[in-house]
Amino acid sequence: MCRIASCIVLLSVISCSARSQDAARYSFSAFGTLSTATKLFRNADSPNDLLRDQYVPFDNFLSGGIDLRRDFPDIHLQIGLSVEYLSRNQTYYLTSPTTFTAVPVEDGFTAVPIELSGYFPIPISTSTFHVYIGGGTGLYLGSRHYEYAGARASAVSHKTEFGIQVLSGIEYTLAPPVSVRCEAKFRDIQFETTNQFQQSSVHYLQHNEPLDDTPFTSRIAIDGLALNIGIVWQF
């Protein structure tokens, strides 16, 4: 794997640059993302293995972000910084421990990945069609949204985490300075967040549902494939 990556980088360095010397050095893009797999582990700090491994799946949801890149043609390298906003919620039901009726739960998360990446052009690129590979690291912020029978558990703390990602993409120039970019990214995002109910019970269906006001920790794992498509402005 390392030999293949080294060969690709070497070919990129010794290949002729597809762009002219007076080409635009910066690019800005706005893009949409389809994330294929996310898991919300509801009891991340539970001593029980079965409870700790229980999760709520969030698959195939849309999000968006922006991206700024700087081209270094002399070394055939591009550096970029991207920011995304991911948010997803769903409703499911849990059985009440007191009335044994189904109680609605609103559960979900918000995540903000801030990623710094390097991009290497592949020698098959042309003046209008660019193929590249890349990777980098990211800072990931986020929190969990949790409501039980209409009572919300406020987010009281969260941990900022770091992760890595690898990617490949293509960019096609529609008409200078506008192009369209498609990208496939594999990344490993994991962060923990702590929530707490601010009340001991909630009135639901003519009776009081007890709430555990002890802080509880959840873990969000966004480790699937992210498919991006966006419009790029070069300047």
Image: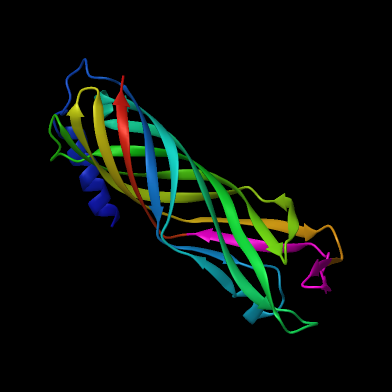
Instruction: Kindly give the residue lying farthest to the top in the view shown.
Output: 22
Residue 175 appearing in the image: yes
Question: Which sits in the foreground, 152 or 19?
Answer: 152
Quadrant that contains the C terminus = top left
Magenta span? 202-222
Q: Quadrant of residue 59?
A: bottom left
Q: Is residue 112 left or right of residue 61?
A: right
Instruction: Kindly give the residue lying farthest to the right in the view shown.
Output: 200
Compared to 113, does 41 lie above or below? below
Give residue 47's position: percent from left, percent from top.
72, 76
Residue 43 appearing in the image: no
Q: Is residue 97 left or right of residue 144?
A: right
Query: Which secondary structure type mostly characterizes the magenta part of the structure?
Result: strand
Question: Which sits in the foreground, 61 or 129?
Answer: 61
Q: Is residue 218 magenta?
A: yes
Give residue 136's position: percent from left, percent from top.
42, 44
Compared to 101, does 41 lie above or below? above
